[in-house]
Image (cartoon, helix red, strand yellow):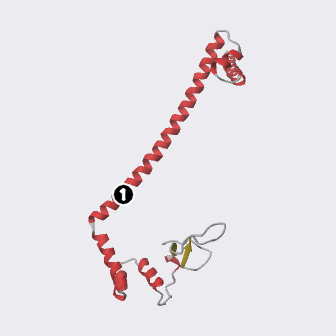
Amino acid sequence: MDFVRFPEDEKCYRTLHFRDDESSELYNDKMEIQILELRKLPEEVRTGEDIVDWMRFLKGKSREEFERMAETSVYFGEAYEALQRLSADERRRLEYEERDKALKDYNTQMSSALRQGQKIGEEIGENAGIHLVCNVLNLHAQGKSVEEIAAVCNSSIEKVQMILQNVKSIFQKRI
């Protein structure tokens, strides 16, 4: 990783295994995650450990660094050749960029659809409220009781009373 995941210590390499949360039983001795925190790798570390050398290789920033490492080991040479093939392969690069664009487009479309859905939901809610007010006023104008209006509109008596009181107070303010 090119960022620090475990800031509480200076370890640049760790191995994580899959274990049962309750019994701590190891799920499988062949499944593990090896974490390499490249930013923690000290410059002065000079060991023969393969993992440290691989960390240095992965941390490489320039073609010269990769070439220098490739000269030190057959494995680094093969890895460097693979990197060169991948970066030189125009078709693969375009496929990667297309996939990346498709993912970004999908996320944008989903976000837009969510916003539209929320707006439509708000409008439906407002329209339903306006529709209810119109029905209450029409039935009230026909002389229906609050209880009858509530039953016809499938609403509570309290809600019908509130609508009628609010409309009454609006008209009183205008008179």
Q: Which quadrant of the figure contains the C terminus?
A: top right
Left or right, 49 with respect to 140, comes to left
Reply above or below: 137 against 124. above
Tell me which residue sits at (31%, 64%) in the image: 93
Image coords of residue 114 (percent x, y): 49, 43
Say what secondary structure mark 1 lies in: helix
Residue 39 relative to residue 162: left or right: left
Within-10-Å neighbours for mark 1: few <14, some 14–19, many 20+? few
Q: Residue at x 49, y 77 (%)?
A: 38
Residue kind at label 1, given as amino acid type = Arg
Residue lying farthest to the top in this orientation: 142
Q: Is residue 155 left or right of residue 68?
A: right
Residue 171 occupies quadrant: top right
Please name the residue that numbered disc 1 is placed on.
99
Q: Picture coordinates of residue 121 (x, y %)? A: 54, 35
Question: Percent x, y for residue 28?
Answer: 54, 72
Q: What residue is drawn where x is 60% and y is 18%?
A: 135
Residue 32 image point, x, y percent: 52, 73
Q: Hey, which quadrant is residue 146 in on the image?
A: top right
> Which one is in front, 119 or 106?
106
Q: Quadrant of residue 86?
A: bottom left
How many numbered marks, from 0 up? 1
Identified at 71% across, 17% down, the residue is 147
